[in-house]
C-alpha cells in the first residue's frame, strides 16, 4: 500500500484568522498539561490490562463479520456465546481463528455457523497453543480490515486535495429527522446553503444499546440510528453534492455509548470524517460504567487515529448541568484530560476537536467578555487543534428571534477567537429538531459573520490586566487546582466525587460493567500490534511505543 | 390540538375563577393601554400597528423549486389559510427543489376572548420561604418527591433545573427546600422503574420531564405511565406532574396527570403547587 504525504491534513486557516493573545502563565499551562498526562497514564495502565464485549465485537467486525440474525447482530450473538462459556478472558480471536483454520470457512460464514450451532465455539475454545496457521489467518484478516480503513483515509485526502474544503471555523449543522432518506435531503440542502460538516444525530437511547442496529432506518426519535447502512447512504449523498459544489463535505456521527469501538471501526470503513468520541461523556451523562467507557475509548480512539478522522469531545455538556461561570474551569481540566487520553491513543493535534461551549446566561453583565475569555483560553491551550465550539442551548427561550441573536453573538465569538469547528446554533433549539429553513437561516448568518469578521482576531488585542485577560488567568488557575486534586486521587475516584458537571459516578455503578474483563496472559487480538505499527509508521505514535506494547 | 379537559373548578385566569356568565368586556389582567381600553373583547383580531389590521407574519418552506411560481404558491397557500393580501417579503432558494418564504398577510378572523378558557395550575405563586412556612404548618415530615426523564429521553436539563440544589435563573431547586426529600433518578428511566421507586419510597409526588417530543413520543410515554400506575393501583397516592417545553397543564390533564408545567417554569412554581395541593388533600381527608 502506498501512503499519501498528506496525513491528517490540518484545516485551512485563512490569512489573519487568529485569536488575540492572552499571555497565559506558561508554567501553569505546562503544569496543567503534565498533570493531565499523569492522569491519562494511570488510565492507560488500567485499560491495557482489560477488554470488553464491545472490543471483542470490534475485532470480529474488523475481520469482516457483519449482518444480523432476526435483528440481532452476528457479532453480538458470537461474543455472547463467548461470555456464556466464561472464556472471554482469552479473547474472541483465539477460538474464532482456530475455527476458521479447522472449518475452512470465511469469517462471515463461520459466524453464521456458530449462531446455528452453539457447540462450534465450544469445540475451539480450549486450545492451549494456537497453531501458527491460525495466527496467520487472524493477522491477515486484521490486516485486511485495517487496510479498508486506511484506503478510506487516502480517499478522503484525495478528495480534499482535489475539491478543497471549507475555511475555519467549519460550519457544522445537524440533521435529525429520524428517517435517513429525509436526512439525506436535509443534508444536501444544508451543504448547498454552506454547511461544511453534517452531523446525523442518533435516535435517543442508542448510546445505551449494547449492539449496533442494522440496515437503513426510516423511523427514529430525536434522530436517526447510527448504522453502517445509514453511514454509507449519507456518505454517498455528501460525496455527490460535494463534487457538484467543489467542496468536500464532512460527515459526523457518534462513536460513543456502549458500542464506541464498533462504531469507530464502522466509521473507518464508511469514511466518516468526525466522530463524537469523549472519554468521559458516557460516564457522566449516560451513566455508563467508567471501566467500560475508559477501555472502549482507548480502542475506539486508536481506530479513529488510523481513520484520520477528527474526534469531538463533549465538555460543552458540563455547562448544561453546571453553571457556566462557576464551572468554566472543569471544562478546561476535562479538555486537558481528554487531550492526554487522545494523544496516548495516537490521535494527532489535527484530529483533536476538543469541545467547549458558550453557555453563560446572556443577561449577565459582561457575559460576552466572559465568553470571549473562555473561548480564547481554550484556543490558546490547544494550538493547532480544530476546536469544536458549541452554541448556547441552555438559555434558549422559545423566542426564536432572540435565540437567533444569541447564536449570532456566539458566531462572532467563534470567529474572533479562531475556533476550528463551529456547531451552529438553531433559533428553534429546545423547541424542535431543526426544520430545513432553521438550518439555512443559521448558515446564512454564520457565513456573513465569519466572512466579515475573520480578520478581527488578528487586529484586536485584549487589554493587559483587563476583564478578559484576568478572567482567563483565573479560570486557568482554578483548573490547575482541580487537576492537582484529580492527579492525586486518580480519575476514577475523581469521577466518583462529582467534580465534572456536578455528577458523581461510582467505578462499580452504571451500565455495561458486566461486559468488562481482565485479559488472561494468552489473550490475543491480532489487530493490536498491526494497528500500533501503522500508527507509528504514519507518525501518530512515537516509535518506542511499538516495542513497549509488544513487550 | 385535541380537546382540552376542563373542570369548572379548575378554570382560572391569574388566580381568579371565571364566572359562569361572562360580560362582553372584562378587566384585562395587567394594565391596559388607552387604545385597547374598552375594545370589543368578543371580536379580537391580530394586531400590527392599527386596531383591526389583522397583521401576521409567517415563515415556512415548500418542496417547490425557487421562482415566481413558487412565490405565488406561497401566497395561494396563505389565502387558503384564510389570510388576505399575502405579501412574500422574502423568498430563498434552498436548493434540491425547496424554497423558503417569509410572508406578511392580514387575517380577517376575530376571536371571542370572553369565551376563552384555559386550564391552568390553580395554586398561587409563593416564594421558597412561604412554601416552607405553609409546609411546616401542616406537615411534621418531609414530602418525598421522585423525578426523572422517562423513556428514551436523555435530556436532564429540565428536571435538573427544577430539582438540583443549584436550580435555575436564581431560584434554588427543590433539593434546597427543607420540606422535601428528593430522589432524582436521572435520564432514560423506564415507567416501570419509576413506579417501583415511587412505591419503595412511598412518594408524595412524581415529576416526569420530557424534552424530546418528536412524533409526539412524549405523549405516548406519559400516557403509558398513568396507565401503568392505574394498573398497579398507584394512581391515587402520589401527585403526577409532568414538565417540558412542549407540555402544558391542559395537555397534562388530558394525559391523566394532576398537573403540567411548560417552558419558563421555575422551582417555586412546582414546589408551591405540590405543597398547596397536598395541604388541600390533607384537609379534605
Image: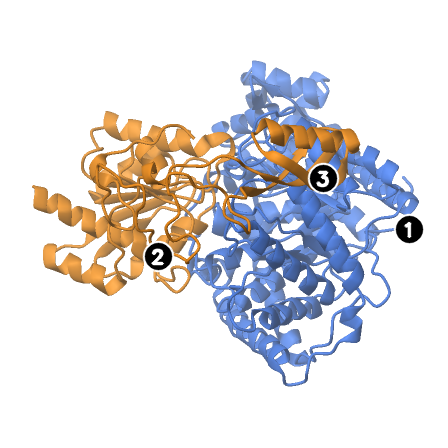
Label 1 vs 3, first from the N-terminus: 1
- Which chain shows up in orange? B
Q: Give the numbered dot on residue B30.
A: 2
Q: Disc 1 vs disc 3: which is toward the camera?
A: 1
Q: Furthest-bottom residue in view?
A: A465
Q: Label 2 vs label 3: CA separation?
A: 71 Å
Same chain for the residues under marks 1 and 3 in the image: yes
Helix, strand or loop at disc 3?
helix
Check if mark 2's residue and mark 1's residue have beta carbons within 8 Å.
no
Front in this rendered view, residue B146 or A362: A362
Camera-side residue of B75 and A127: B75
Circle 3 crowding by C-alpha within 10 Å: few under 14, some 14–19, many from 20 = many
Give the vertical position of A147 relative to B170 (above or below).
above
Chain painted blue = A
Q: Given the image, what chain letter belongs to the residue carrying mark 3? A: A
Quarter the C terminus of chain B occupies: top left
Q: Is residue A199 left or right of residue B230?
A: right
State the residue position of label 3. Answer: A527
What residue does disc 1 label?
A5
Which SS class for mark 2? loop
- Judge if badges 2 and 1 mark residues of a common chain: no
Query: How far separated are the C-alphas under marks 1 and 3?
Result: 24 Å
Residue at left 38%, top 56%? B32
Where is A424 relative to A362, above or below? above
Which of the chains bears the disc numbered 1?
A
Amino acid at each position: 500500500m502506498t501512503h499519501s504525504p498528506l496525513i491528517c491534513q490540518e484545516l485551512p486557516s485563512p490569512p489573519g484568522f487568529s485569536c488575540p493573545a492572552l499571555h497565559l502563565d506558561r508554567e501553569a499551562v505546562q503544569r496543567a498539561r503534565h498533570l493531565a498526562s499523569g492522569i491519562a497514564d494511570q488510565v492507560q495502565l488500567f485499560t491495557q490490562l482489560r477488554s470488553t464485549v464491545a472490543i471483542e465485537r470490534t475485532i470480529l467486525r474488523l475481520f469482516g463479520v457483519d449482518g444480523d440474525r432476526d435483528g440481532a447482530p452476528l457479532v453480538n450473538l458470537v461474543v455472547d456465546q463467548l461470555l456464556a462459556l466464561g472464556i472471554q478472558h482469552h479473547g474472541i480471536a483465539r477460538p474464532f481463528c482456530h475455527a476458521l483454520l479447522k472449518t475452512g470457512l470465511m469469517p462471515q460464514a463461520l459466524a453464521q455457523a456458530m449462531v446455528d450451532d452453539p457447540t462450534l465455539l465450544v469445540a475451539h475454545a480450549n486450545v492451549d497453543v494456537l497453531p501458527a496457521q491460525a495466527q496467520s489467518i487472524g493477522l491477515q484478516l486484521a490486516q485486511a480490515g485495517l487496510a479498508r480503513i486506511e484506503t478510506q483515509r487516502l480517499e478522503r485526502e484525495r478528495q480534499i486535495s482535489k475539491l478543497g474544503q471549507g475555511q475555519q471555523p467549519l460550519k457544522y449543522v445537524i440533521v435529525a429527522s429520524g428517517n435517513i432518506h429525509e436526512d439525506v435531503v436535509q443534508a444536501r440542502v444544508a451543504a448547498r446553503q454552506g454547511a461544511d460538516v453534517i452531523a446525523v444525530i442518533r435516535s435517543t437511547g442508542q448510546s445505551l444499546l449494547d449492539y449496533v442496529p442494522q440496515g437503513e432506518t426510516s423511523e427514529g426519535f430525536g434522530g436517526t440510528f447510527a448504522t453502517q447502512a445509514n453511514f454509507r447512504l449519507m456518505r454517498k449523498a455528501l460525496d455527490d453534492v460535494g463534487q457538484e459544489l467543489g467542496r468536500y463535505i464532512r460527515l459526523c456521527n457518534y462513536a460513543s455509548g456502549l458500542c464506541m469501538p464498533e462504531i469507530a471501526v464502522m466509521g473507518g470503513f464508511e469514511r466518516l470524517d468526525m466522530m463524537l468520541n469523549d472519554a468521559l461523556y458516557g460516564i457522566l451523562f449516560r451513566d455508563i460504567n467508567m471501566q467500560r467507557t475508559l477501555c472502549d475509548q482507548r480502542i475506539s480512539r486508536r481506530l479513529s487515529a488510523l481513520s484520520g478522522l477528527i474526534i469531538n469531545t463533549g465538555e460543552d455538556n458540563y455547562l448544561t448541568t453546571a453553571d457556566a461561570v462557576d464551572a468554566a474551569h472543569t471544562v478546561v481540566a476535562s479538555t486537558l484530560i481528554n487531550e492526554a487520553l487522545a494523544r496516548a491513543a495516537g490521535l494527532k493535534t489535527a484530529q483533536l476537536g476538543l469541545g467547549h461551549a458558550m453557555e453563560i446566561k446572556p443577561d449577565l453583565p459582561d457575559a460576552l467578555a466572559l465568553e470571549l475569555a473562555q473561548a480564547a483560553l481554550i484556543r490558546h491551550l490547544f494550538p493547532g487543534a480544530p476546536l469544536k465550539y458549541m452554541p448556547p442551548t441552555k438559555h434558549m427561550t422559545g423566542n426564536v428571534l432572540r435565540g437567533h441573536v444569541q447564536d449570532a453573538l456566539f458566531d462572532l465569538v467563534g470567529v474572533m477567537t479562531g475556533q476550528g469547528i463551529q456547531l451552529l446554533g438553531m433559533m428553534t433549539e429546545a423547541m424542535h429538531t431543526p426544520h430545513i429553513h432553521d438550518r439555512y437561516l443559521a448558515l446564512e448568518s454564520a457565513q456573513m459573520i465569519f466572512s466579515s469578521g475573520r480578520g478581527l482576531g488578528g487586529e484586536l488585542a485584549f487589554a493587559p490586566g483587563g476583564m478578559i485577560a484576568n478572567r482567563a488567568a483565573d479560570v486557568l488557575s482554578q483548573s490547575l487546582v482541580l487537576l492537582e486534586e484529580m492527579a492525586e486521587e486518580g480519575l476514577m475516584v475523581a469521577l466518583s466525587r462529582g467534580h465534572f458537571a456536578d455528577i458523581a459516578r461510582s467505578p462499580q455503578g452504571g451500565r455495561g460493567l458486566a461486559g468488562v474483563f481482565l485479559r488472561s496472559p494468552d489473550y490475543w487480538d491480532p489487530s493490536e500490534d498491526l494497528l500500533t505499527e501503522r500508527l507509528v509508521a504514519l507518525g501518530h505514535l512515537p516509535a518506542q511505543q511499538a516495542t513497549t506494547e509488544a513487550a | 390540538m385535541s380537546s382540552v379537559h376542563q373542570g369548572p373548578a379548575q378554570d382560572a385566569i391569574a388566580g381568579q375563577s371565571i364566572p359562569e356568565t361572562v360580560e362582553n368586556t372584562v378587566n384585562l389582567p395587567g394594565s391596559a393601554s388607552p387604545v385597547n381600553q374598552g375594545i370589543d373583547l368578543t371580536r379580537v383580531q391580530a394586531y400590527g400597528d392599527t386596531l383591526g389590521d389583522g397583521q401576521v407574519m409567517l415563515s415556512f418552506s415548500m418542496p417547490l423549486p425557487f421562482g415566481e411560481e413558487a412565490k405565488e404558491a406561497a401566497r395561494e397557500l396563505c389565502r387558503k389559510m384564510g389570510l388576505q393580501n399575502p405579501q412574500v417579503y422574502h423568498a430563498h432558494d434552498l436548493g434540491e427543489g425547496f424554497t423558503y418564504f417569509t410572508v406578511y398577510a392580514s387575517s380577517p378572523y376575530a376571536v371571542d376572548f370572553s369565551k376563552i378558557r384555559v386550564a391552568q395550575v390553580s395554586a398561587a405563586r409563593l416564594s421558597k420561604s412561604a412554601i416552607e412556612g405553609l409546609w411546616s404548618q401542616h406537615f411534621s415530615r418531609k414530602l418525598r418527591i421522585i423525578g426523572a426523564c422517562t423513556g428514551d429521553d436523555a435530556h436532564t436539563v429540565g428536571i435538573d433545573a427544577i430539582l438540583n440544589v443549584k436550580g435555575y435563573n436564581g431560584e434554588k431547586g427543590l433539593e434546597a427546600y427543607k420540606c422535601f426529600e428528593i430522589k432524582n433518578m436521572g435520564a432514560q428511566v423506564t415507567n416501570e422503574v419509576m413506579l417501583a421507586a415511587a412505591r419503595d419510597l412511598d412518594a408524595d409526588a412524581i415529576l416526569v420531564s420530557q424534552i424530546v417530543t418528536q412524533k409526539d413520543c412524549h405523549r405516548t410515554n406519559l400516557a403509558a405511565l398513568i396507565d401503568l400506575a392505574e394498573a398497579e393501583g398507584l394512581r391515587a397516592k402520589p401527585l403526577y406532574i409532568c414538565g417540558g417545553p412542549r407540555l402544558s397543564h391542559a395537555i397534562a390533564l388530558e394525559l391523566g396527570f394532576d398537573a403540567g408545567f411548560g417552558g419558563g417554569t421555575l422551582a417555586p412554581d412546582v414546589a408551591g403547587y405540590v405543597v398547596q395541593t397536598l395541604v388541600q388533600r390533607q384537609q379534605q381527608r
